[in-house]
Amino acid sequence: MKAILARKYGSPDVLTLEEIDQPTPGDNQVLVKVHAAATNPSNWHRMEGKISMLRKVYGDPQPTDHAMGGDCTGTVVAVGKNVTRFAVGDAVFGAAKGAFAEYAIAAEKNLVHKPENISFVDAAAIPTGGLTALQGLRNHGRITSGQRVLIIGASGGVGTYAVQIAKSFHAHVTAVCSTRNIEMVKRIGADEVIDYTQQDWDGAGPYDLILDMVGDRPFDVYVKNLTPGGRMVSVGALGMDMMAFMAKMGAYKASQEEEKVFSYTAQFNTDDLSTLAQLMASGEVKSVIDRRFPLEETAAAMAMQGSKQICGKVVITI
Ligand SMILES: NC(=O)c1ccc[n+]([C@@H]2O[C@H](COP(=O)([O-])OP(=O)(O)OC[C@H]3O[C@@H](n4cnc5c(N)ncnc54)[C@H](OP(=O)(O)O)[C@@H]3O)[C@@H](O)[C@H]2O)c1
């Protein structure tokens, strides 16, 4: 089968399209014929190999695990002997190891059935961005109806789902993005938009919940824009170096008594993937697709991911 591999760390030109053996599912695994896969910042960090923690997982000084890709959708072609939720022929979406390929292996718990009224491209786009938005708003932000919610980085892979999921909780959403994305974030449901090239969100609040994908301000600035009892959920660091951001978060957490700033790593689980499937099936959440690339052009898709300029998601079709 054809697969994209990364045998070295570096820029997108390390990616190679190779012919490799089709994998065989273990007892609790599913073999998926991949129809579409999405890029994510995590794929970029894995490819670059600049984060020392990730090198411990993928190999150092060069990757020992060459597979690339995770979020995907496709058709089940084989199941392990303990798999109960899926049968050959089922259309599924979720996470599969090495999803930038014609076939990929997924743990049963990391997949759910794809709603029939959702395209393979739209389903491939949602897993990581959707789960991150859902878990950030609901589990860590404790979002409730009528709250004023500020979403910083609203036009990206997490932000576009966060705007729509916050609206599904009947929150009042203010989205922060640049000029070119104003119409898009309004279209997906933002009640108000702050164009960060023209206006600072600092001082425009206060907000009951701030979901931040950018991370470029001191944490005190977020906290002073919260209502009493408000929560700031820090998702990512589009606006700064990831290692510097992690050091900043560690120092802030160590110095605070009252916890108003929350950080987390999104987790795959069947219940939350099912919630996303329902939100998509009902039309409350839609994927915003910036661009599609064929598998052969995965390096170009990853270059776009690295630009931090994606409007919604980039999808690789196979
Ligand atoms: N905690 C977790 O478990 C978790 C999970 C997934 C992702 N993350 C992290 O969360 C962050 C966002 O991920 P993502 O998938 O949404 O990234 P993404 O799709 O690459 O985000 C791209 C978007 O970010 C916007 N952007 C860039 N700089 C901005 C700024 N200064 N202010 C406002 N918007 C800005 C861009 O819009 P404009 O052109 O309009 O600026 C673009 O639309 C990343 O740092 C990622 O590593 C964390």
Image (cartoon, helix red, strand yellow):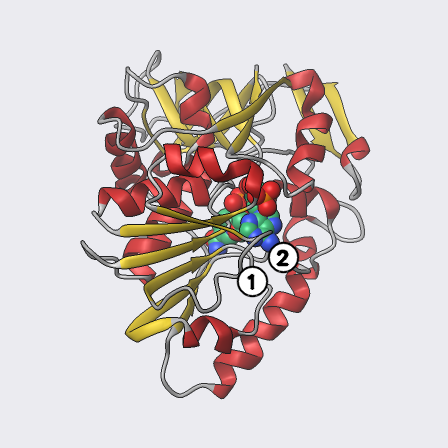
Q: Nearer the viewer, residue 28 or 196?
A: 196
Q: Position of residue 126 (x, y in %)?
A: 42, 33
Quarter of the figure that contains the C terminus: top right
**Does 96 sit left or right of 123 as displayed?**
right
Q: Nearer the viewer, residue 43 or 57?
A: 43
Q: Position of residue 165 (x, y in %)?
A: 30, 43
Above or below for 280 versus 78: below
Identified at 76% across, 34% down, the residue is 12
Q: Say what amino acid the circle numbered 1 marks.
A: Gly
Quarter of the figure that contains the N terminus: top right
Q: Position of residue 287 (x, y in %)?
A: 41, 29
Above or below for 243 versus 2: below
Q: CB under 8 Å between callouts 2 and 1?
A: yes
- Asked if ligand 1 lies within 8 A of label 1, the reply is yes
Local secondary structure at mark 2? loop
**Does 247 sit left or right of 86 as displayed?**
right
**Which residue is identified by label 2?**
239
Identified at 46% across, 30% down, the residue is 125
- Asked if ligand 1 lies within 8 A of label 2, the reply is yes
Which residue appears farthest toward the front when viewing the image?
A: 198
Identified at 79% across, 47% down, the residue is 62
- The reply to whether residue 80 is in sight is yes
- The reply to whether residue 26 is in sight is no
Q: Say what amino acid the circle numbered 2 marks.
A: Gly
Asked which quadrant contains residue 314, the reply is top right
**Which residue is identified by label 1?**
215
